[in-house]
Image (cartoon, helix red, strand yellow):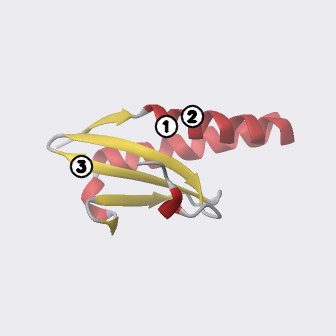
Amino acid sequence: MKFRLRIRAAARDDLRDARDWYRMQSADLAERFAHEIGAVFSSVEERPLIYAKVYKDVRRAMTRRFPYGIYFVVEGDRISVLRVLHQARDPRHWPR
């Protein structure tokens, strides 16, 4: 069963901010970041339940080459991506 992925506004903002930062470093780096995020999204869509819960029903998928975690919840046949955060950020400080 493939799940449908929904990226919430806060996660979209996180992705845009990260992409812009990597783009300022180099266009190639920004492209590699986007590719890595896409690969993790595909993995989450295929098998979301393999990722550990980190807080209540929130699960985290980590990127391999970049220090980012993708935080999401599974809601029936849908996956809601809540945030995409650099791992230096403390998720306890997310706005509710």
Q: Which mark is residue 40?
A: none
Q: In the displayed structure, does residue 94 sit left or right of residue 79?
A: right
Q: Which residue position holds label 2?
A: 13
Q: Which mark is residue 10?
A: 1
Count neighbours of disc 2 (C-alpha within 10 A) and say few if under 14, some if 14 to 19, many if 20 or more: some
Q: What's the distance in space between the residues labelled 3 and 1, CA to CA?
A: 17 Å
Label 2 SS = helix
Of labels 3 and 2, earlier in sequence is 2
Front position among marks 3 and 2: 2
Q: Which residue is mark 3?
A: 74
Percent coordinates x, y for residue 53 in the rendering: 31, 66
- Residue 34 lies in what quarter of the image? top right
* Apparent side of residue 33 relative to residue 59 in the rendered image (left or right): right
- In the visual, does 84 lie left or right of 57? right
Q: Amino acid at mark 3?
A: Val
Amino acid identity at mark 1: Ala
Residue, x 58% and y 47% (percent of image)? 36
Q: Position of residue 52 (x, y in %)?
A: 33, 68
